Amino acid sequence: MSEIAIQKQPFRVPMTDGKIIDEHFGLATLAVGNLSLARMVAPPGWSEPHQTPEFDEYTLVISGRKQIETENGVIVLTANESVFIPRGNRIRYSNPFGEPCEYVSVCTPPFSIQNVNRED
């Protein structure tokens, strides 16, 4: 039987763009595992470069709105909406709106700076 793990002190990822990332499970917290789970808050006006991740990503918006640019167009998620983005898709996440966006993200395999493939 496996051990149950309760996360009371997630790892706060150091960021310089105002975004909050609290990793509950993943490489920064356990250094093992087949997924990462993080709660994030993207401030108004936040964006990051295009990326082509080597992981599948599931995102659930808790509050606010999150914009996702894809090869096929733009997706805007609002509270209680979710999206699945399969690995290998070129995407860009942003919050061009006037309020913060809180969301939860699950990546499998786990997110790492090496497998996100952000463009400069």
Image: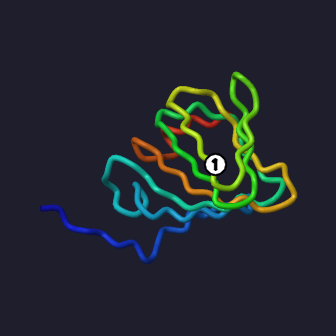
Q: Residue at x 70, y 22 (%)?
A: 72
Which quadrant of the figure contains the N terminus?
bottom left
Whether 7 is drawn above or below 110: the answer is below
Which quadrant of the figure contains the C terminus?
top right
Q: Which residue is mark 1?
A: 81
Q: Residues within 10 Å of mark 1 (few under 14, many from 20)?
A: some
Q: Residue at x 49, y 62 (%)?
A: 23
Whether 29 is drawn above or below 90: the answer is below
Left or right of 100, for residue 85: left
The residue most toward the top is 72
Camera-side residue: 71 or 119?
71
Q: Secondary structure at mark 1?
A: loop
Q: Residue at x 59, y 41 (%)?
A: 83
The amino acid sitting under disc 1 is: Glu
Left or right of 109, for residue 80: right
Left or right of 109, for residue 82: right
**Looking at the picture, how far across and down is residue 49, in whole percent?**
71, 39
Camera-side residue: 89 or 61?
61
Left or right of 8, for residue 77: right
Whether 19 is drawn above or below 67: the answer is below
**Looking at the picture, how far across and down is residue 52, in whole percent?**
58, 31
- Residue 16 in sight in this render: no
- Residue 88 in sight in this render: yes
The residue most toward the bottom is 8
The residue most toward the left is 1
